[in-house]
Amino acid sequence: MKRLMYWILALLAASNASAQKFEGLAPTPPMGWNSWNTFQTAINEKMIMEIADALVSSGMKDAGYRYLVLDDGWMAMERDSLGNLIPDPVKFPHGLKVVVDYVHAKGLKFGLYNCAGTLTCAKYPGTRGYEYQDARNYAAWNIDYLKFDWCNTNGINAKEAYTTMSKALRKAGHPMIFSLCEWGVNKPWQWGEPVGQLWRTTEDIYQVFDSVHNQGTWDALSVMRIADLQDTLRKYAGPDHWNDPDMLEVGNGMTYEEDKTHFSLWAMMAAPLMAGNDIRKMSPQTKELLTNKSIIAIDQDPLGIQGFKYTDKDSLQVWFKPLQQGDWAICFVNRGSHDRPVMFNWKQTPVVDPVFHYTLEKNIDYTLYNVWTGKQEGTTKKNLNAILKSHDVLMFRLKK
C-alpha cells in the first residue's frame, strides 16, 4: 500500500512539474478584441483608448468581451541598451503603462503581442533569447494576456520555445493567459495543454467566406476553410485549453449572412471570440450580431465541449454541440450559392457525440429556441422543415 501511495505521489509531482501555465484563467474560451485584422501595425495610444471606450459603450464588455489585445507593431524597432523592449515613442508618447492603466480602469483586461522568433512578423524585436527578461517586463506592466507568434523561427523547436516562454511567465509571477499563435504547424494541440490556455490551429483568417486569399508567400484562409480543419481536433479542447481557429472577421466586409455563419460556427466550436473589426465605427447590425447573448452563451457554455460536424452533404452541413444540463445546440449551414431546403427528423435521426458520447434523447421533446430570432419555434416532436438562404445558418438551442 505504501509503495502504491509512493507512485501516486510521484506521478502527481511529475504532472505538476510538467505544467507551466497559470491554471484557471480560461474556464471558458477567452473573449475580447485584437488590433491586427483591421489596423495591422497602424496602432497608437489614442486609438487604443478609443477602442477601450467603445468596448464599454457598445455593450461588448457587458456581453463578455474583456481582453483588449494590442498586436504586432507596438514596440520600437530596437531594444534599449539593457535589452528591454520599449514602446514606440511616436505611437505611445506617454509609454505603454499609461494605456494599460486606462484599459484596466475601464474594467477590461490588457493583452500584448510578441513572437517566439528573433523578429516579429512585422520585423520588430522578437523574444528569442529574451524570454525571462520580457516576461518580467510584461508582469511589471500588469499584462493579462500574451499572444505569442511564430515568425522568423528557422531552426527553433516550437514545443521548446513555447514551453520556455510559459515557464518565464510563470517565473515572473503575474498571472496571464498565454496564447500560442503557432498556426498549427507543429500540432500544438498535442503538447500545448500544460503550456498555454489556447493554441492556433491554422494559418491566419481573412474576410472571405469560402476560399483562400493569396498573401504572396502564403495563403490566408476563409471562414469555411478554417472550419473544415477543426472537427478532428475537438478531443484536445476543453476548459483552460482551447483550440483557436483565429480571430473574428465579423464586420470586416462579408455579407450579413456570412457574418452570422462565421459567428455561429465559432460559437459551435467553442472558439475564443476575439473581435477584429473597428468597433468605434461598427454598424448597429454588426453590434447586434457580436453581442447576441444566446450565441455567446453557446460558445461560453461551462461544459466546455467543442461541437462537431454531424453531416456534410450537397453543401448543407449540420453541426451539434452538447451543452450543460442536457441541452444541445444545432446549427444548419448552407455553404452553397443557392437557397436550400432543410429537413430534420428528430425522432428518427440518431445523434451521438462520437468523442464525448453525449446522446440526443429521442424520448424527450426538446423546445426549439431560435438563437438568432430569439423565438421558440416548436419542439422536436415535429419534424423540422425550412428554407435556408445561401451562406446563412439556422441555429437552435434545444432545451429540455
Image (cartoon, rainbow, N blue to C red):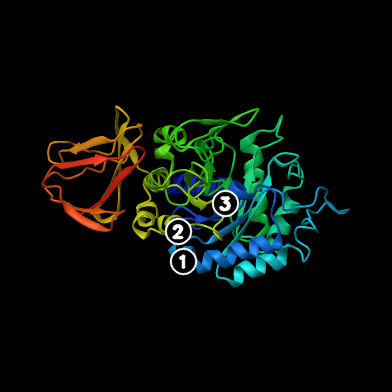
- Name the one closer to the observer, 389 or 113: 389
- Left or right for 90, reference 369: right
User: In this rendering, is residue 56 above or below 121?
Assistant: below
Indicate the quadrant where residue 69 lies: bottom right
Horizontal and vertical percent position of residue 217: 65, 27
Residues at circles 1 and 2 in contact by the CB criterion of under 8 Å: yes
Taking the image as shown, residue 63 lies to the left or right of residue 35, namely left
Mark 2 — residue?
287
- 239 lies above or below 338: below
Q: Nearer the viewer, mark 3 or mark 1?
A: 1
Can the viewer see residue 400 in this picture? Answer: no
Can you say which quadrant of the picture contains the C terminus? bottom left
Residue 187: x and y in percent read 53, 33
Specify whether 397 is left or right of 130.
left
| Residue annotated with mark 1 | 59
Q: Relative to 336, say whether 94 is above or below.
A: below
**Nearer the viewer's eye, disc 1 or disc 2?**
2
Give the residue at the far bottom of this rendering: 105
Q: Position of residue 109 (x, y in %)?
A: 57, 63
Give the alpha-carbon distance from disc 3 to disc 1, as whole Å.
31 Å
Residue at 71% x, 58% y: name it. 44
The amino acid sitting under disc 3 is Lys
Which residue, given by chain and number where applicable, does mark 3 sit on?
21
